[in-house]
Amino acid sequence: MPQDRSTQNKLLSALSEGEYERLVPYLEFVSLPFKQVLYEPNQPIEYVYFPNSGVISMVTITEDGETVEAATTGNEGMVGLAVLLGVEQSPLQVIAQVAGDALRMRSEVFRREVTPDSLLYTLLLRYTQALISQLSQTVACNRLHSVEERCCRWLLLCHDRVGAQEFFLTQELLSQMLGVRRASVSVVAAILQKAGLIRYTRGKVRILDRQGLEAASCECYRVVKTEFDRLFSETDNI
């Protein structure tokens, strides 16, 4: 398998050279700037996305306009799993929370080309299971764990996907993703900064102590990471 696959997306990189090259003509490179909306709730899904970099959030919006993040996706996954499941729309808003780029494919092409006999289809079924685990873990986390623990979990997930020590993140954004007041995030950010785990300035977060951040996080980060790591460690057996 060649080393240069022209993508940093782990699902696409796990494909055989032949299958990847078969799909290349249908893949379009796109930039995903901060706060770009990929899908609006209950609207037709025109494209599926395979992120190379950045962080994409799936967000629930209540009737009164409150938001909370249900799950995140980075270069380990695909955005638009509803299409795989035979659905044309989703009740969630999907938005780029950390800028990056992706390869996208039209939904009708995806349905035609990614068939049950393809490796990508099998990988996406496994990815769906890992994402369901993330969703269920997030529900438990939001109910049972402190804002500080949840904040550490979110920062670690971002750090994994961004692949850089520093990334853009406002307190307003983080409060929306965690479903808490901005004041709560401000207090937590100050605590983490005083502990030497992060440096936060002008809407940018720099991870200073990765191990310390993992120790301050709840077990949910480890559970989710283990599930996704297992997904890719078993690809050779498919």
Image (spheres, grey):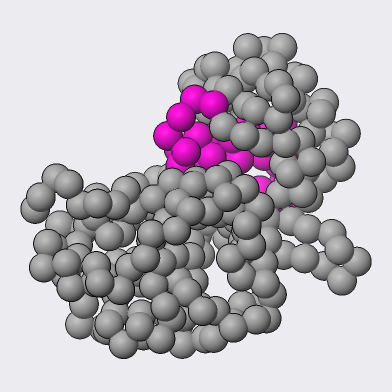
Q: Tell me: 89 left or right of 124.
A: right
Identify the residue at image location x=55%, y=45%: 99
Q: In the rendered image, is residue 97 in sight?
A: no
| Quarter of image, res 30 | bottom left
Total numbered circles: 0
Say whether residue 147 is magenta. Answer: yes
Q: Which residue occupies the foreground of this view, 140 or 11?
A: 11
Identify the residue at image location x=17%, y=47%: 4
In the image, residue 20 lies at what x, y percent?
A: 19, 65
Identify the residue at image location x=12%, y=62%: 17
In the image, residue 204 lies at what x, y percent?
A: 65, 28
Say whether residue 79 is magenta. Answer: no
As drawn, 140 above or below 24? above
Dominant SS type (magenta)? helix
Q: Tell me: 46 left or right of 12.
A: right
Q: Which residue occupies the foreground of this view, 96 or 157?
A: 96
As drawn, 193 above or below 221? above
| Quarter of image, res 77 | bottom left
Q: In the rendered image, is residue 173 in sight?
A: yes
Q: Which residue occupies the foreground of this view, 152 or 14?
A: 14
Say which quadrant the C terminus sits in: bottom left
Residue found at the very far right of the displayed protein: 64
Q: Tell me: 202 left or right of 135.
A: right
In the image, residue 115 lies at what x, y percent?
A: 27, 84
Q: Which residue occupies the foreground of this view, 36 or 17?
A: 36
* The magenta segment: 141-166
In the image, residue 80 lies at what x, y percent?
A: 49, 71
